[in-house]
Amino acid sequence: MQEEPIKKELIVGYVNLKEHFDALWDERKEQLNLHFTLLKEALVKNDTEIERRLIGLNELRAEYTNDRTHDRQMYVRQETFDARVEEIKKIEKRLTVLETRIITWTAALALFFLLAQLILKLWWR
């Protein structure tokens, strides 16, 4: 008994193997193209978001740097402060010596005039 070849037209849903793989390949290509297109869009959005964040960080850094520069200008450096304190201490020491001399001379003059007054009072009597 010899089998009769199956007629393609009679089988419902019969698809040629090459046509089937071509259809699968085309579908997969479409999916991959869509996937790559979506990936490209995501990368562009990601780059835009990163750029926006970097701009914000640069502004924050600039503000921080300006604040630190302002702080540096507001405060005196330790070396400058120490040098000025030394100058003030020297001036204070000189003033103390001068005040002591003035007080001494004032007391001496007061004593001189007191003695002169006593001597004159005793002499004129």
Image (spheres, rainbow, N blue to C red):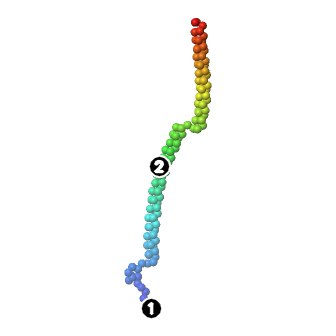
Estimate the x, y position of residue 15 in percent, counting from the top left: 42, 78
Identified at 48% across, 47% down, the residue is 60
Estimate the x, y position of residue 43 in percent, counting from the top left: 47, 58
Determine the image quadrant of residue 8: bottom left
Q: Residues within 10 Å of mark 2 (few under 14, many from 20)?
A: few
Estimate the x, y position of residue 24 in percent, counting from the top left: 44, 72
Q: Secondary structure at mark 2?
A: helix
Inspect this view and state whether residue 91 appears.
no
Inspect this view and state whether residue 115 appears.
yes
| Viewer-side residue, 53 vs 124 | 124
| Viewer-side residue, 71 vs 51 | 71
Determine the image quadrant of residue 4: bottom left
The quarter of the picture where the C terminus appears is top right
Return the disc, 1 or 2, that comes first in the chain's sequence: 1
Residues under labels 1 and 2: Cα distance? 82 Å
Please determine whether, in this image, residue 23 is positioned above or below residue 125: below
Please determine whether, in this image, residue 13 is positioned above or below residue 67: below
Residue 82 placement, left or right of 34: right
The quarter of the picture where the N terminus appears is bottom left
Estimate the x, y position of residue 100 in percent, counting from the top left: 60, 24
| Viewer-side residue, 111 vs 10 | 111
Q: Residues within 10 Å of mark 1 (few under 14, many from 20)?
A: few
Task: Please say if the residues under marks 1 and 2 sit with CB atoms less than 8 Å apart.
Answer: no
Q: Amino acid at mark 2?
A: Gly
Q: Which residue is mark 2?
A: 56
Identified at 46% across, 74% down, the residue is 21
